[in-house]
Image: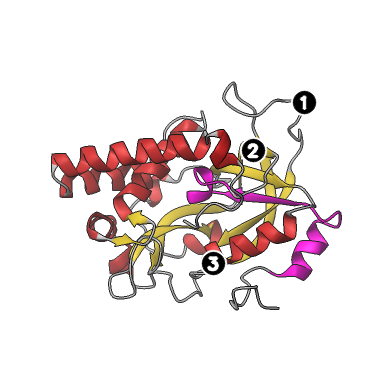
């Protein structure tokens, strides 16, 4: 099947219908979906998935970089495979469950297939669909308890698998300083790579579960050291504005339909 734009789909309609026989959809966001939600959602629930590690080990030649100078964006890696890789920050991953915090969105059946196609286009740069249990956690900043599922629910999640062409296979490319240097100078059609990093840190903090993991906070520190003070202030201010606008859209923006892809 091909999308209306002529682009082969990233997700499988068969898998979606098997996991959501009622025709609705739950999708989990661990990167830009946290602050740039899909359209037509009727619930946003903070929580986590287990068994993965989040890393800026996916190249971006569209949204946060170019084909000539790819940026760096996040993917999640299965804990068992990640343990076979050389990661200088491995000692910070002390959770046996390998928890990834983020936000899940429920899309009603009336718009689920439409939104799935939109996400396919948004996540086309090396990502494929997978399904995993999502554990909702309600906080004072989270969703209303009467509207949120109390038990784990199946969520679709887009993952850049290590087999995809954008995954950083060379260990030297995955070094924190190497990733930070790329982020500090990269820019794509969705904006500067540094803004993406700063927004992710702020969005994770905004979920109400504490600071982002060390991999992200360490990258933020390194990238800020590579930028001058004025650049840091500018990118952080832009990240704050974009985050506020994305999570609290105006009445007009809320009814525009599909947001621009990240």
| Position in image of residue 3 (x %, y %) | 65, 73
Which residue does the image show at 17% across and 48% down from the upper left?
227
| Position in image of residue 251 (x %, y %) | 57, 34
Choose the circle earlier in sequence order: 1 or 2: 2
Badge 3 element: loop
Lateral position of residue 228 relative to residue 260, left or right: left
Choose the circle earlier in sequence order: 1 or 3: 3
The residue wearing badge 1 is 146
Q: How crowded is mark 2: few (under 14 residues within 10 Å), some or many (20 or more)?
A: many
- Alpha carbon separation for disc pair 1 and 2: 13 Å
Which residue does the image show at 51% across and 65% down from the upper left?
160
- Alpha carbon separation for disc pair 2 and 3: 22 Å
| Label disc, if present, on residue 44 of the rendered structure | 2
Badge 2 element: strand
| Label disc, if present, on residue 127 of the rendered structure | 3
Q: How many marks?
A: 3
Tag 2–tag 3 contact (CB < 8 Å)? no
What stretch of residues is rendered in magenta? 12-37
| Position in image of residue 211 (x %, y %) | 42, 33
| Label disc, if present, on residue 66 of the rendered structure | none
């Amino acid at each position: 099947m091909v999308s209306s734009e002529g682009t082969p789909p990233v997700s499988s309609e068969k898998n979606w219908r098997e996991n959501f026989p009622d025709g609705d959809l739950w999708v989990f966001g661990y990167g830009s979906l946290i602050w740039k939600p899909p359209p037509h959602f009727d619930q946003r629930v903070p929580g986590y998935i287990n068994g993965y590690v989040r890393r800026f080990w996916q190249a971006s030649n569209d949204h946060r970089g170019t084909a000539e100078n790819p940026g760096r964006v996040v993917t999640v890696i299965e804990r068992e495979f990640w343990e076979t890789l050389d990661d200088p920050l491995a000692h910070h991953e002390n959770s046996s469950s390998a928890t990834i915090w983020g936000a899940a969105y429920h899309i009603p059946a009336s718009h689920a297939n439409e939104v799935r196609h939109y996400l396919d286009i948004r996540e086309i740069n090396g990502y494929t669909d997978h399904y995993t249990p999502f554990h909702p956690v309600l906080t004072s900043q989270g969703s209303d308890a009467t509207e949120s599922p109390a038990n784990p629910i199946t969520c679709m999640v887009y993952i850049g698998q290590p087999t995809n062409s954008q995954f950083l296979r060379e260990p030297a490319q995955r070094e924190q300083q190497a990733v930070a240097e790329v982020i500090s100078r990269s820019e794509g059609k969705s904006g500067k790579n540094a803004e993406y990093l700063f927004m992710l840190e702020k969005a994770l903090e905004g979920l109400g579960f504490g600071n982002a993991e060390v991999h992200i906070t360490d990258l933020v520190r390194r990238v800020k050291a590579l930028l001058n003070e004025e650049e840091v202030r500018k990118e952080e201010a832009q990240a704050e504005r974009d985050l506020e606008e994305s999570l609290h859209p105006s009445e007009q923006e809320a009814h525009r339909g599909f947001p621009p892809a990240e």
